Image: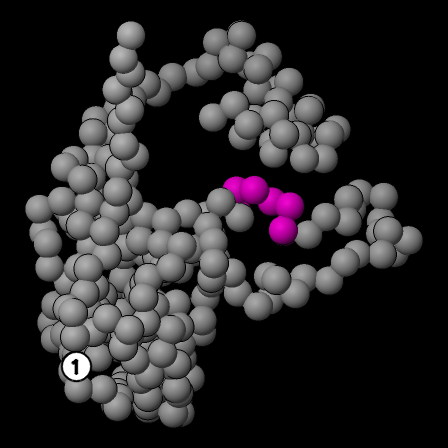
């Protein structure tokens, strides 16, 4: 009997040959955990209240899973960004032979929640290619606010659009001159199968058995630290 081994879906990040080794490459999101997260101090059990387990967010799998899912596209080259007039004026410069930041028109986002801050766009020089039926969600790096800019989220069908995707953003930092170093986390890329969007939806009150399951899981989660990690997540 022969077995057919199916290869795992593959995402490809492609650059111009001239850029290889020059621009910062994408990395798994798990490799870009921020310093504040890595440096979370140990907790002294003697100083805890009765209701405090002493666990840090490092033990919160939903938080950690969000941070480590997908890939990070870093900034290709160092950018200097000057913000003035409470964010109403933003100018950028760079020492690179191609555009790193460009502008959008304010009329394109009239009434947006960022107010008077002008929409701009970081230029990306990586082409992302996914298998047929797969798209990519592009978001601000999750749980990594940088206090300087916020990427506007978007979804692109990267199985058919095989060209570099640029990333709109709003500068959110204080007035002044800011330097964003080459390799800084720019956007988080989360590939997904589009057919998952066709899942059927059911909205109703829960049945008695579902109520029992909910209450059981709630009791276990409260009683056993790490239950989600060792039981619920282990079954996926």
Residue 133: x, y in percent? 16, 35
At x 47% / y 58%, what residue is drawn?
31
Toward the viewer: 81 or 6?
6
Q: Secondary structure at mark 1?
A: loop
Residue 172 placement: quadrant? bottom left
Question: Within 10 angstroms of label 1, few (less than 14), some, or many (20 or more) residues?
Answer: some
User: Would you say residue 37 sits in the magenta stretch?
Assistant: no
Residue 116: x, y in percent? 26, 77
Residue 85 placement: quadrant? bottom left
Residue 41: x, y in percent? 73, 62
Can you see residue 106? Answer: no
Residue 37: x, y in percent? 59, 61
Q: From the viewer's perspective, is residue 204 above or below residue 15?
A: above
At x 18% / y 50%, what residue is drawn?
129
Residue 32 is left or right of residue 187, and the answer is right
At x 18% / y 40%, what residue is drawn?
131
Report the residue marked by disc 1: 99
Specify the principal SS of the magenta part: helix
Q: From the viewer's perspective, is residue 201 above or below residue 155?
A: above
Q: From the viewer's perspective, is residue 114 above or below residue 88?
A: above
Residue 26 placement: quadrant? bottom left
Residue farthest front in this picture? 1
Can you see residue 125? Answer: yes
At x 75% / y 28%, what residue is drawn?
223
Residue 130 is left or right of residue 28, and the answer is left
Q: From the viewer's perspective, is residue 116 above or below residue 150?
A: below
The part of the chain drawn in magenta is: 57-63
Image quadrant holding the N terminus, namely top left
Toward the viewer: 187 or 129?
129
Q: How many marks?
A: 1
């Amino acid at each position: 009997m022969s077995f057919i081994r199916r290869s795992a879906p593959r995402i490809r990040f492609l650059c111009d040959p001239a850029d290889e080794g020059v621009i910062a490459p994408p990395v798994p999101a798990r490799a870009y955990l921020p310093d504040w997260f890595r440096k979370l101090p140990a907790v002294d059990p003697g100083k805890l209240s009765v209701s405090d387990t002493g666990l840090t967010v490092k033990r919160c799998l939903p938080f950690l899973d969000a941070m480590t899912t997908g890939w990070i596209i870093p900034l290709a080259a160092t950018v200097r960004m000057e913000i003035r007039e409470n964010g109403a004026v933003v100018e950028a410069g760079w020492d690179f032979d191609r555009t790193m930041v460009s502008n959008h028109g304010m009329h394109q986002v009239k009434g947006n929640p960022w107010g008077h801050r002008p929409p701009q766009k970081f230029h990306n020089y990586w082409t992302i290619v996914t298998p047929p039926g797969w798209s990519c969600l592009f978001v601000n790096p999750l749980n990594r606010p940088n206090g300087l800019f916020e990427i506007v989220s978007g979804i692109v069908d990267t199985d058919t659009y095989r060209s570099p995707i640029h990333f709109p953003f709003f500068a959110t930092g204080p007035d002044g001159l800011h330097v964003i170093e080459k390799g800084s986390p720019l956007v988080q890329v989360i590939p997904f199968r589009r057919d998952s969007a066709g899942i059927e939806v059911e909205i109703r009150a829960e049945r008695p058995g579902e109520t029992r399951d909910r209450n059981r899981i709630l009791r276990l989660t409260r009683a056993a630290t790490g239950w989600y990690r060792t039981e619920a997540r282990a079954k996926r």
